[in-house]
Amino acid sequence: MTLPSRLVALATVCSLLWPAAPVASHDLPNLGTVAESALPQAEENRIGRDILRSLRDEGDVIDDAEVVSYLNDLGTTLAATAQAPQLQFNFFAVNDRSINAFALPGGVIGVHSGLLLSAQSEAEVAAVLAHEIAHVTQRHLARMQENQGRSQLWLLAAVLAGALAGARSSNSDATFAAINAGVGLSASQQLAYSRDFEREADRLGMQYLAAAGFDPRAMPAFFQRLQQEQRHNDNNSFGFLRTHPLTGERISESQARAQSYPLKMRANSQDFLLVREKLRIATLGPVDAIAYYRQALAAGRYLDKGAMLFGQARAWLAQGDAAAAGAALPAVQQTLGNHPSVWLLAGDVQRANGQLAAAVQTYQQAMQTWPARRGLRLALIDTLLQAGRAAEARQAIDQALQRYGDDPLLWRLAARSYGEADPLRYHAALGNAFFFEQKFDSARLQYQLASRAKGEDFYLRSAIEARLRELDAQRQSAP
């Protein structure tokens, strides 16, 4: 298992030790008051964000705007069927070839790129997300440690922090051996619970899946295929089967349960097909991806030819061959038609060829049809800044912040747009970027620099002082 995989696997184990907020009744078991007696929801959310930040700092998280938007759109649709509006889910992709997914404290759910690449349909990806959502809504994280108490939760939080720190050291094997020894003290009890919890996550996840319009048969089909493939090729790629142990009995129960639902034929969305190819390039790298597309297209081995052509053009662009990507673009446009990812690709090709004005026009034209597409907005702003059109970029940033006010990348672009000419707004924007990245010490420093910078803006200075007071209060209340 690679080091990022080990981090995620350990995060998965430790995530089973924190509570999640309650969910409306669906003939569910009485969950009692575990969350109240174990860990407040705010602290659980903080732990989840801290782990996600650590994974992002390690470079394991894929921050592509289209990938992030797709996973959160799909995940939010599934989570809405759980009727738990008090839960705030956050879905993200991990750049790892293994087939796995995991739930962290606070409704933070990660999916390995290898899982999306191995899935044969969008319904299979939805099935895995629904399963993880059920782990959160059913408070499996807290119920697993119902008899351990809050002190054990904090102990294991410290263990996880040590694991993340140890990942940066040269002696990672010794670090993980020590951690595994500590976690192993309660392993037998955890495994005793896990079978029931997995069945419960299957049952509730299938309800969420069906309510969102997907065929519930995708869940047992995916599990069964993974189990069969593992028997013939167990090369540590099937992490999902280790963190979510399967049995023949459990698969049979899942198959029987799925048969009680009406059959739902649902085609794969273009977003799913195109996001898979962006993940393929991120996972394989552009050189190996180009070889893959050449072989797959020659052999006719693909789910969708348009997606293959799109991926091939993206791979050439990632390798720096803008001419090849531009030559491939007409075939992509003809095959896939009017899709925002195709427009984004077209603008990116123009930009790579130095045609900045044309790229701006392409992004702006696409946004008239798809104003909610974050990837188009970010590309437009970045290109405007690259072209030296800072005033237009700031106008686009202000419009984007009305939709995505907590987006760190937007705030970094805002800082770029101000630069040395406006230190007050530069440091304030950079402070906001760090704040929403949960890097609070760096945020505090930038806010302090902003408060000392020249410039007149009463409302901005008031906001900076309020944010500094918030950070100070947070520091004082931290355990």
Image (cartoon, rainbow, N blue to C red):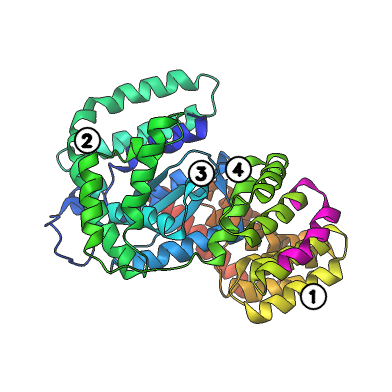
User: What kind of element bears circle 1?
Assistant: helix
Give the distance between the C-alpha atoms of the residues marked 1 and 2, in whole angstroms. 56 Å
Residue at the (29%, 56%) spot, across then down: 134
Q: Pick the residue in front: 82 or 233.
A: 233
Membership of 128 in magenta stretch: no
Kind of residue at badge 2? Gln
- Residue occupying the far front of the picture: 299
Residue projecting furthest to the bottom? 368
Q: CA distance from mark 3 to mark 1?
A: 35 Å
User: Is 116 in front, or is 65?
Assistant: 116
Q: Which mark is residue 283?
A: 4
* Magenta span: 317-333
Residue 297 spot, x, y in % from top left: 68, 51
Contact flag, marks 4 and 3 (Cβ < 8 Å) = yes
Tell me the number on the disc at residue 157: none
Real-space Cα separation, disc 4 to disc 3, in angstroms: 8 Å
The residue that disc 1 covers is 361
Ranked by sequence position, the earlier of labels 4 and 3 is 3
Name the N-terminal-most of marks 4 and 1.
Answer: 4
Disc 4 to disc 2: CB gap under 8 Å: no
Q: Which residue is denoted by mark 3 in the rendering?
A: 114
- Rendered location of residue 451, percent (x, y): 64, 60
Q: Which residue is mark 2?
A: 190
Which of pointers 3 and 1 indicates the residue nearer the eye?
Answer: 3
